[in-house]
Amino acid sequence: MSHYDLIIIGSGPAGKAAAIQAGKLKRRVLVIDRRDQLGGVSVHTGTIPSKTLRETVLNLSGWRERSFYGRSYRVKDDIHAEDLKTRLHMTLEDEVDILEHQFNRNHVDTLMGLAKFVGANEVEVATEAGETIRLTADKFLISTGTVTYRPEYVPFNGKTVVDSDEFLELARIPRSLIVVGAGVIGVEYATMFSTLDVRVTLIEPRDSFLDFIDRTLIHEFTHQIRDNGVDLRLGSAIEKIEDADNHVEVSLANGRHVRAEMLLFAAGRMGATSKLNLEAVGLETDHRGRLEVDRKTYQTKVPHIYAAGDVIGHPSLASTSLQQGRVAGCHALDTPTLPESPWYPYGIYSVPEMSTCGMSEEELQERGIPYEVGIARFRETSRGHIMGLEHGMLKMLLSLKTRRVLGVQIVGEGATELIHIGQAVMNLKGTVDYFVENTFNYPTLAEAYRIAGLDAFNRMPIPEEFKVKRGKDEPPAEATKDAPAAKKKK
């Protein structure tokens, strides 16, 4: 029986980061994954596939050039499912190859199979070859990610009624699509396929969607996706989903019906913990299969067992999972490390994309924080003109008391890249003055920060050091200017 300093179950972003960190610390580490390839959900069915698909759609459809050449402009007239999957498979192969190289370079052992706990410090792994292997370790990290939520009332068939994992293997591009669930996944796929001129209906039972995003941004985004052809249906629950062979029909509680060639159910995911036999180590999950952890160390209530990534719930981002895995790996191996920064960005790879960092305007109002707002439209920038951008905006929230940047929200081309400027300034406790006194490359979209900064700066109270200092008896400038004329008239 082999013994390790750290056994990691799952090779997604959190597992990958912890494993490489352990390898660099020259500890004996093993990564176990239930798939036949490394990478986890992020590489095979989640982050990387969906973002690759988005880039392929935007390139083949000629979406970015339509403001110049018209809405009928296409790079490729007939786009088929195979066109989308070719680039997807190439990207996934490269991702797996790079991950395997990183593990080999850092002396990380790997084992493909389904793991479960059989004791406090022992796991059993069932391999595809039919072997059962038992392993022990001082510490464990659970980074198994999530699986799709598949309620019984949805007649999944893998062809016309699918979940987000199955959707990536679609045999053809449908002429019409129903997307159930206006969360991040649903919104990304709905807007992506509307770009291909697929008639998309996005259904969300709640009256709002993406509630963690600033409402100004959501209003701007909603206007754009509706203009792009997405039929957004909010505020009505689903009563029935019917698979009628050549089409799918959805009945809503408000009496309306929606029909399409295909339905994508993207309303939530579950923590992939059901097969870990957590009872053997005294751990329990919530109703969504997620584990509770100490958010500073990522220890579960069983101190030598850690959990990180989507399996612990919010914020469920690949970016934060990477950080969580690093912190968890260092703590598990008794190695001091830098903590996570307080402000991290959200990225939603929809069309148009959105990204935010810090507080929203609604949060500031709830907390009673006095603030000012700076706005920049991408069409106001020269780079925006060059790129043909008709939409897109950057919103900056600033403290009236300290002048510090409290939040940045961006919708439009390059939002997920641009957000890092705001993130850096926020984490370094920077103020609006940074954007006013610094020079930005011209022409760039990043110049929108300067425009938004000046927009707010010109409405904010003048800093004490910039106020004109006068003597006690010195009259204001305007009074001094008019004094001779007034005296002469007298």
Image (cartoon, helix red, strand yellow):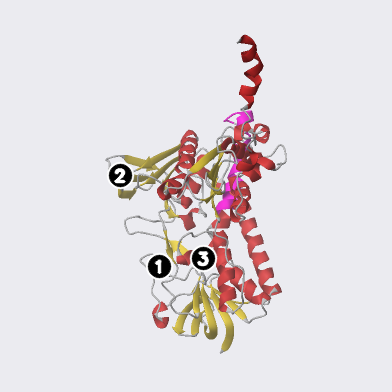
Residue 21 position in % (x across, y down): 64, 72
Q: Which residue is mark 2?
A: 252
Q: Is residue 294 magenta?
A: no
Which residue ends up furthest to the top in the rendered image? 489
The quadrant of the picture occupied by the N terminus is: bottom right
Residue 163 position in % (x across, y down): 44, 55
Q: Amino acid at mark 3?
A: Gly
Q: Which residue is mark 1?
A: 289
Which residue appears at 68% of the width and 77% of the height? Answer: 107
Residue 163 falls left or right of residue 7: left
* Stretch of the chain drawn in magenta: 50-72
Select label 2 or label 1 by which is in front: 1
Q: Are marks 2 and 3 in contact (CB under 8 Å)?
A: no
Q: What label does residue 309 carry, if any?
A: 3
Eyeballing the image, is 66 above or below 312? above
The residue nearer to you, when weighing 191 against 400, is: 400
The residue nearer to you, when weighing 371 against 89, is: 371
